[in-house]
Image (cartoon, rainbow, N blue to C red):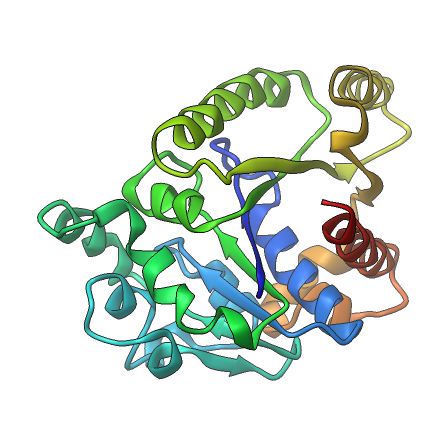
Amino acid sequence: MASVFCIANQKGGVGKTTTSVNLAAGLAAQGQRVLLVDLDPQGNATMGSGIDKRALTRSVYHVLIGLASVREARVRAEAGGYDMLPANRELAGAEVELVDLDARESRLKTALAEVEGEYDFVLIDCPPSLSMLTLNGLCAAHGVVIPMQCEYFALEGLADLVNTIKRVAANLNPDLKIIGLLRVMYDPRMTLQQQVSQQLVEKFGDKVFDTIIPRNVRLAEAPSYGMPGVNYDKASRGAQAYINFGAEMIERVRTL
């Protein structure tokens, strides 16, 4: 059975998609069978995996409203070595259409159940809001990986996200737990980032991943070439960090 994890944070611009795409590639590089689900109507994870969102005939939108199965809608992200359930702007319409459907918050979970045996990891890239799409991701997942920058406002948003996860666990998905916090875009030269990083470790202990993702130009360049940073420049500090993070995730799943 696959381990299903949401990559979530209600704050925008914290590296959710970068983390989703590169973690998928980092896990695939270590022999894991991975499915990446793009739940963001912007389709950035889809494009960053080398898949043209404008050319899609089926997407996660069709899966959510019952017009296609995961097997019919998934595509192979050759650039990263994993399977992809892609998204495009059509997904924005799912917000409205899901309101009238039965079991609207668990439709992704039901769809993924058919293919869970085919993967070791299913990663879900959530949009930066608590929407019906994010709720579907949280209901389908066993745990949440929270990427965050080591800045003051990120700490403020983290408290809201933790409360949201607790509410979903209490009412919709009792299996849901926080797997860990991932420090991203980290610059050790900045004193504030060092202080916030230390505060996170003191407050959350072993919930904070040992791996730290540095601020790295090669990771930022990679999406414009339709490739995960892990595959775009394997020698870069960012790529090495995500490969290490993949190894840490595999180890953490074994100890859960």
Q: Position of residue 16 (x, y in %)?
A: 57, 46
Vertical comparison of 42 with 115: above or below: above
* Quadrant the N terminus occupies: bottom right
Q: Position of residue 45 (x, y in %)?
A: 51, 61
Q: Quadrant of the C terminus?
A: top right
Residue at the image position 73 percent from the left and 66 percent from the top = 27
Observer-nearest residue: 105 or 114? Answer: 114
- Determine which quarter of the picture holds residue 129: top left
What is the count of numbered marks? Answer: 0
Above or below: residue 108 compared with residue 230: above
Q: Is residue 149 visible?
A: yes
Q: Please give left or right for residue 58 compared with residue 237 in the image.
A: left
Q: Where residue 240 sits in the image (x, y, percent)?
A: 87, 59
- Residue under the point 72% across and 57% down: 219
Task: Reply above or below: 118 against 90.
Answer: below
Q: In the image, what residue occupies the spot 57% across and 71% down?
A: 49
**Is any atom of residue 87 visible in this view?**
no
Taking 175 as reference, is 121 above or below it? below
Q: Nearer the viewer, residue 91 or 7?
A: 7
* Horizontal side, residue 230 vs residue 18: left or right: right
70 vs 82, left or right, is left
Q: Tell me where residue 61 sits by quadrant.
A: bottom left
Residue that lies at the very extreme toward the left in this rendered image: 100
- In the rendered structure, the answer to whether residue 21 lies left or right of residue 31 reads left
- Choose between 78 and 53: the one closer to the eye: 78
